[in-house]
Amino acid sequence: MDEQPRLMHSHGVGMAGHPGLAQHMQDGTAGTDGEGRKQDIGDILQQIMTITDQSLDEAQARKHALNCHRMKPALFNVLCEIKEKTVLSIRGAQEEEPPDPQLMRLDNMLLAEGVAGPEKGGGSAAAAAAAAATGGVGADNSAEHSDYRAKLTQIRQIYHTELEKYEQACNEFTTHVMNLLREQSRTRPISPKEIERMVGIIHRKFSSIQMQLKQSTCEAVMILRSRFLDARRKRRNFNKQATEILNEYFYSHLSNPYPSEEAKEELAKKCSITVSQVSNWFGNKRIRYKKNIGKFQEEANMYAARTAVNATSVSAHGSQANSPSTPNSAGGYPSPCYQPDRRIQ
DNA sequence: CATGATGATTATTG
DNA sequence: CAATAATCATCATG
């Protein structure tokens, strides 16, 4: 056994004193003619080391010969172990892979947008949630909703088909590589562990491709969302009746044009708009009225007259068209006197 | 097409 | 959080 280290060293393969080798060398061949075995090992190693120098046909034949050699399993295991150790020492540290926070973010977002979730229900649920979150307008923008939903569905379908494609390609490639490695493991020192690692590497690669897909899908959803919000921003003027109702309330409560929440709800129902739209309207109206009272004077008089007519028609009193008292129209509010140039404070 | 009206959004404030 | 003020984006009109 004293010749072995030298032999190994001379071939540049550092397997000196390897327990596995010693083990294997004792197996089956112990005792009989040790010199012959050592010679065998030397031959095998020599052949392995020089196999790349030969022509393809020669190498093929040599490989076959080596495969059939009785020392082959032992040597194979030894080489596998050595390789395993080397590989592990090279990149044992970076083996661990914490879940990528960015990937998690993408996943969460896709899930939230209903892209990554269940096929049918998720999308519409997300769209409904988005609609509710952005102010829950009634049925008048259902066209936009369906448009949004259709586009989201489209994105989702593309995403899923692409993902499936990747998945399939990944599986195909993995099995292909595994077969290849298994095939090669007859001639090369490839252990099952290594195949496993290879599969892991492939999966990581493919998941990074998937991440790109997720990224671009997220971008598409973001763009769609912003478009949707922009579309929501696209306004339609309230119809005449709604404007009249709102103006009526405003000018009847000119001294305190701040409808309570219930009053807003009432107005919203009457005008078939949302409460937030009522709030918007009153906010705009107050500031614009205050900014230029003169401009609104005519309008103010008109609505004042109208409410006066309403009031007088109820009270059967005919001569108050120009200085009407303000009836409380919708909500049972205190009815202050109408003052044309009253300031909003 | 320029312009004012108007609904919605955003930043600020109390 | 609601009101305000400024601003944006679109509508409507001459």
Image (cartoon, coloured by chain):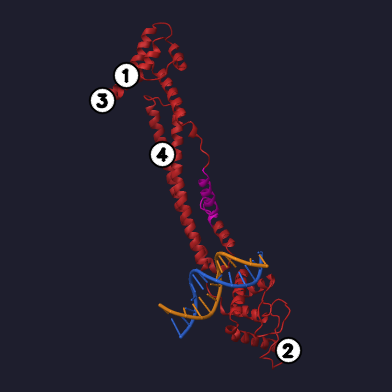
Chain colours: A red, B orange, C blue
Magenta region includes residue A121: yes
Identify the residue at horizontal 29%, vertical 22% (top origin).
A61
The stretch of residues the image draws in magenta is A100-123
Residue to which mark 4 is pinned: A172
Dot 1 falls on a residue whose secondary structure is helix
Q: What x and y, as percent, mark residue A201?
A: 44, 36
The numbered mark at residue A315 is 2
Amino acid residing under circle 4 = Glu
User: Which-is-in-front pick, marks 4 and 2?
Assistant: 2
N-terminal label among 4 and 3: 3
N-terminal label among 4 and 2: 4
Q: What x and y, as percent, mark residue C12?
A: 49, 79
The numbered mark at residue A21 is none
The front one of A25 and A342 is A342
Q: Are marks 1 and 3 in one subunit?
A: yes
Amino acid residing under circle 2 = Ser
Q: What x and y, as percent, mark residue A16?
A: 42, 16
Quarter of the image that includes the N terminus of chain A: top left
Left or right: A237 as drawn, with respect to A256: left
Dot 3 falls on a residue whose secondary structure is loop
Residue to which mark 3 is pinned: A55
Rendered position, A138 above or below A312: above
Q: Are marks 2 and 1 in one subunit?
A: yes
Residue to which mark 1 is pinned: A47
Q: Are marks 1 and 4 in one subunit?
A: yes
